[in-house]
Amino acid sequence: MLVTLEEAKLYLRIDSDDEDSLVTNLISSAEALCKDVARLFSEELAEQSATTRVAILYTIAYLYEHREEADYHELILMLRSLLFGVRRQVL
């Protein structure tokens, strides 16, 4: 994982351990989504950690705050913008 549970909870301003499993699932989902949008393998995503960590934290926060009504189109567009510099081109 590029983002730890503790980092994600700090970013989300969560003080208790009540939502640890939710946040852990969000971390996994956010990393997978960023990997797919950037068209990178996990190792390549880790190599671009400065950029991808911001995108992953943004995704975690978005999914956490919009649990009931997430607009995935809006999220994907934002991730494309955040990951533009590291996104692999389609051949």
Image (spheres, grey):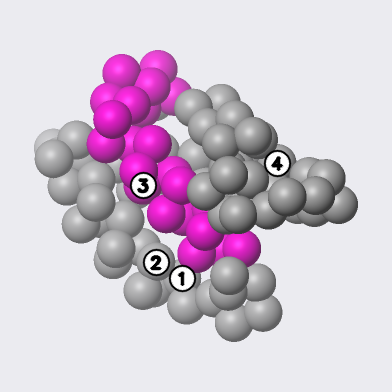
How many residues crowd mark 4 within 10 Å: few (<14), some (14–19), many (20+)? some
Q: Residue at x 44, y 24 (%)?
A: 42
Q: Is residue 58 left or right of residue 83?
A: right
- What's the residue type where badge 1 is placed? Tyr
Q: Is residue 45 magenta?
A: yes
User: Which label is found at residue 72?
Assistant: 1
Chain part drawn in magenta? 42-64
Of 17 and 34, the residue lying toward us: 17
Q: Is residue 54 left or right of residue 85?
A: right
Q: Is residue 18 magenta?
A: no
Locate the C terminus by quadrant: top left
Q: Which label lies toward us, 4 or 1?
A: 4
Q: Is residue 19 left or right of residue 80?
A: right
Instruction: Provide residue 59's location: percent of width, then percent of height.
Output: 46, 55
Element under label 2? helix
Residue annotated with mark 3: 55
Q: Which mark sits nearer the N-terminus, 4 or 1?
A: 4
Residue annotated with mark 2: 75
Q: Which mark sits nearer the N-terminus, 3 or 2?
A: 3
Whether label 3 touches label 4, CB < 8 Å: no
Magenta part, dominant SS? helix
Residue annotated with mark 4: 24
Identify the image quadrant of residue 39.
top left
- What's the residue type where badge 4 is placed? Thr
How many residues crowd mark 2 within 10 Å: few (<14), some (14–19), many (20+)? some
Q: Which mark sits nearer the N-terminus, 3 or 1?
A: 3
Q: Is residue 36 visible?
A: no
Q: Residue at x 34, y 37 (%)?
A: 52
Instruction: Provide residue 88's location: percent of width, then percent of height.
Output: 20, 36
